[in-house]
Image (spheres, rainbow, N blue to C red):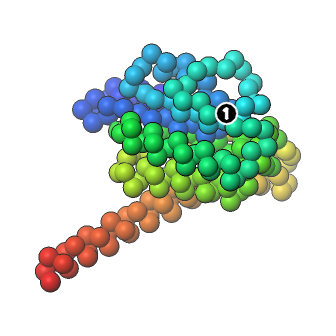
Amino acid sequence: VVALVALRDYPRTMHRVLIVDLDVHQGNGNAVLFQEDERVFTFSMHCEANYFSKKQVSNLDVELPKGCNDKEYMRHLRWHLPRLLDQLQPSLVYYQAGVDIFVGDRLGKMDISREGLRERNWYVYEEALTRDIPLVTTMGGGYPRDLDADSAPFREIVDAHVDVYKTAAEALSLRQELLRLNATNGAALVRG
């Protein structure tokens, strides 16, 4: 919906949207919704052993093995994301930040640590920000093994969701500080 609204309401500035769906399940809804719309490119990186509904065809589906760890996950993301950003040059990145790839997730079937989730989030933000591409981030799956809000498994999932937004704030703050420093140093060079 965000992609459609952006394309509809901002046709002069929004020419292409890249959906980066990093939930453990395939982004089949986006794949179907945008299968005929060349303005939207759907990229889904998900667990090959975790389909809860009919598999669809995204513009790019990357199926990862059950038990995939941080290193393997990031290897795939580091390979695909910069190439897509450079080739497509999107006006907007829509990041679906599923935390159900976390090792402590009840449904995920992957072995991504909390630090691995933070690294993934930071990487997505950094890649978009360094290219000055606006980014929309939404929560994705995350299913605690224990539904008691006071339990450690419940807190782990909540904390992983919180990390998505804390990392976004940290990445944006760092980017703004770097831009400020560059502007200050540039002004000093002109005066000097």
**Left or right, 139 with reference to 155:** left
- Residue 70 x/y as whole percent: 70, 53
Marker count (numbered): 1
Q: Which residue is mark 1?
A: 63
- Residue 97 in sight in this render: yes
Q: Residue at x 73, y 55 (%)?
A: 113
Q: Residue at x 71, y 56 (%)?
A: 114
**In-image side of 125 versus 106 (left or right):** left
* Residue 180 placement: quadrant: bottom left
Q: Residue at x 51, y 29 (%)?
A: 42
Mark 1 crowd level (few <14, some 14–19, many ≥20, 10 Å Cα): some
Residue 17 picture location, percent across and down: 41, 33
* Disc 1 element: strand
- Residue 36, by quadrant, is top left
Q: Is residue 152 above or below residue 56?
A: below
**Residue 88 horizontal side relative to residue 80, left or right:** left
